[in-house]
Image (cartoon, rainbow, N blue to C red):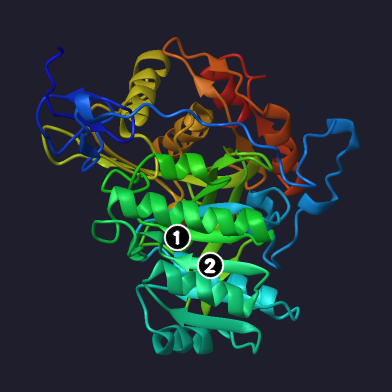
Amino acid sequence: MAKTSSAFSCTECGWQASKWVGRCGECQQWGTVVERAREGATIARTTRAVQPAAGREARPITELTGDSVRHQATGIGELDRVLGGGVVPGAAILFSGEPGVGKSTLLLDTAARTAATGARILYVSGEESTGQIRMRAERTGAMHDTLFLASETDLATVLGHIESVNPVLVIIDSVQTLASDQIEGAAGGPAQVREVAAALIRVAKGRGTPVILVGHVTKDGSVAGPRLLEHLVDVVCHFEGDRQTSLRFLRTLKNRFGPTDEVGCFEMTGDGIQEVPDPSGLFLSRAGVPVSGTCATVAMEGRRALPVEVQALVAKSATPNPRRVTSGVDPSRVAMILAVLERRMGARLHDQDVYVSTVGGVKLGEPAADLAIALAVLSAVTDRPLPHDLAAFGEISLAGEVRPVASGVQRAQEATRLGYVRLIDAGAETLQQARTGAGL
């Protein structure tokens, strides 16, 4: 007779252990290791086949139409861009972001704009009272008779609200605050999150009502809770931004109904969050007199080309170890560019403090900004300003070569649209040619 012994397994990946541990050794998730049934108590069950209900029989794909899953605009162009054209009926959307970044404000604005068309919207919050939500709605102008508010943490009550209101859009803020009395454990636990998400997704699919779930994030920026949550939903959006600046970016990490490389730009203001269809004004300075140490480039955020101005300042160092200070650019990338400038072009930088920054708080992480950084530093060293109508993008190698970058045609088109008539890119074979073309 086989020896029966209790064991523990992870509810996410199935990893097994002989004793309980707080963190799974395979998927590294916390709180997912539970005790499984004894081997002797396991009962083998067989699922019997049943006939599908009328109207749900399998049909040839050529006989099906996609009219019922067309995108519906939300009234916010940047949000529609990220979602692929709007919200799809019956879709489950997971909305994550750092605390205080503006998730609730953006979704309340989305609910208000949809309610302005006469549609019934249900906004359920487990973190704020209805009075607190109304205060924010008054400040942002989101007051409509068809926008229904509820402050609930019980799943069954939320489902009752959906039945009584019969909305065309449901917003849950947040999924970690809801709990079901049918499942053991506190709200926000793996079992509760799975049950709450599964129940709301069933409602979305059964009623054809899109549901937006707000999710908390961990310290490393990933969605809190079981990984299964991201697999259950149709769309995963991440709202990010620096609290020190008003700029916000909305990205899609998963989208079953559209692209995943679109980026939406928003700006946090005193009246709420405003979309920024043309963010070029946020990343470019408008100095009337040309100033040395500045160069414009074109960065790619998903499919969107964003013009960004790079600024550099070079000053005589008063210490044996010159400072290298960066903001919005990769420090190691800047250090490599400075080494190439000194070794390949003879620029005297070893005894100079170098400061490199971007305008507007945008972060440049792609190699396409190398050439603009190099020209800005050279302009600061020589104290000769670059022309206002010049833009540069290209990767710089250790040999001093200017290499082509992805989406070069789209970058050039965006720069031309903004009035930059002098473009320096991979057509300049070396950094020396790029410097000559810039007039330095």
Residue 147 position, x and y percent, is 61, 82
**423 in relation to 363, above or below:** above
Q: In the drawing, does residue 6 fall left or right of residue 207?
A: left
Q: Residue furthest front?
A: 1
Circle 2 SS class: strand
Residue 72 position, x and y percent, is 75, 60
Residue 281 position, x and y percent, is 60, 59
Q: Nearer the viewer, residue 177 or 8?
A: 8
Identify which amino acid the numbered label 2 is placed on.
Ile
State the residue at coordinates (64%, 87%): 144
Q: Looking at the image, do the residues carrying marks 1 and 2 touch, with CB atoms under 8 Å apart?
A: yes
Q: In the drawing, does residue 404 fall left or right of residue 61?
A: left
Q: In the drawing, does residue 330 fall left or right of residue 257?
A: left
Q: Quadrant of residue 18?
A: top left
Residue 285 in view in this figure: no
Q: Nearer the viewer, residue 29 or 100?
A: 29
**288 in relation to 249, above or below:** below
Please report whichever mark, 1 or 2, sits nearer to the chain's N-terminal start.
2
Identify which amino acid the numbered label 1 is placed on.
Val
Numbered tag placed on residue 214 in the rendering: 1
Residues packed near mark 2 inside 10 Å, few (<14), some (14 to 19) or many (20 plus): many
Q: In the drawing, does residue 60 fall left or right of residue 383?
A: right
Circle 1 SS class: strand
Residues packed near mark 1 inside 10 Å, few (<14), some (14 to 19) or many (20 plus): many
Residue 379 position, x and y percent, is 47, 38
Residue 340 in view in this figure: yes
State the residue at coordinates (54%, 60%): 212
Q: Residue beneath label 2, please?
A: 171
